[in-house]
Amino acid sequence: MEIKQFTIYMSIQNYNTQTMKKPHFWEKAKAQLIKKDARLGKIIKSYPRDFLFTKSDPYYTLARAIVGQQISVKAAQAVWNRFEKKIESVTPNNTLSMHYMSLKSCGLSRQKIKYLRSLASAFISKELQILKSKSATDNEIIDKLIKVKGIGRWTAQMFLIFNLCRPDVFPEDDLGLLKGICICYNLEYPISKEYAVKISQKWKPWRSVATWYFWRSLDPIPVEY
């Protein structure tokens, strides 16, 4: 079971927005959020060139999210760098073919090795074909993903935001998001997730965008999975 955590802020190598394509809804969402919420709007206006960009490989996104669970930003980046260097190409087959000790030498715990292998097996057996369905709802995808050992609701929500680019995802268990909201509205941290969900209603149908900007307000480098 996943625990509540700060979102992992992964360093982006050679970050350059001019070489990346922003979501088709991004500018529309920004304009509507600025109009709806002056305080959030101030954050949005502070980062005029930044935007969410996604990875096209679902296994890569989910594997990276698993590696980053429950550890610090710096530690997560170091482990991922070692893992990616050893595996060369992050694929389900390559993950399963890696020796246990090779995975352990990357800094992965026994539990996370088990989770990565479970995820790889699910992809190879085509248990996650729903991830390719454009008609599947957010909840349908979450329900399917959390059946894989090591993937909880938070990781599934990260997948919806960073891989499928769904516009209205609100990861209410993310402590980084809650911290960003509290700072923005001068609230005592932490607020309950129920209260956060209540507040978030005014950001619909662009809660992924609002969430991304609250994360952005806390970190000098944009979030990546």
Image (cartoon, rainbow, N blue to C red):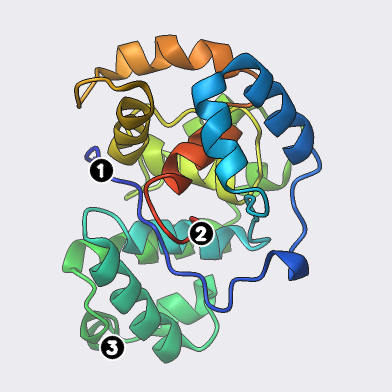
Q: Residue at x 53, y 65 (%)?
A: 60
Up-down relation of residue 140 to residue 192 (above or below):
below
Closer to viewer: mark 2 or mark 3: 2
Q: Amino acid at mark 2?
A: Glu
Vertical side of 213 occupied by 96: above or below: below
In the rendered structure, are the residues bearing label 2 and label 1 in contact, judged by CB atoms less than 8 Å apart? no
Front-lying residue, 30 or 46: 46
Q: Tell me the residue at 66%/43% (across/down).
A: 165
The percent coordinates of residue 176 (x first, y second) are: 32, 40
Judged from the image, the secondary structure of the residue bearing numbered disc 3 is: helix
Neighbours of disc 2 within 10 Å: few (<14), some (14-19), many (20+): some
Q: Count neighbours of disc 3 (C-alpha within 10 A) and say few if under 14, some if 14 to 19, many if 20 or more.
A: some
Question: Picture quarter containing residue 209?
Answer: top right
Q: Is residue 145 visible?
A: no
**Residue under numbered circle 3:** 102
**Which of the two discs, 2 and 1, labels the residue nearer the N terminus?**
1
- Left or right, 65 with respect to 23, comes to left
Mark carried by residue 224: 2
Identity of the residue furthest to the right in this view = 24
Distance CA(mark 2)–CA(mark 3): 25 Å
Secondary structure beneath disc 2?
Answer: loop
Residue 156 appears in the picture as rendered: yes
The label number, if any, that marks residue 187 in the structure image: none
Quarter-of-image position of residue 115: bottom left
Residue 5 marker:
1
Do the numbered discs 3 and 1 sit on residues whose CB atoms are within 8 Å?
no
**Residue type, label 3:** Ser
Q: Earlier in the sequence, mark 2 or mark 3?
A: 3
Q: Which residue is at a point 68% across and 61% down the rendered structure image? A: 56
**Separation of residues labelled 2 and 1 (CA atoms):** 16 Å
Q: Quadrant of residue 152?
A: top left
Q: In this rendering, which labeled residue sits more in front, label 3 or label 1?
A: 1
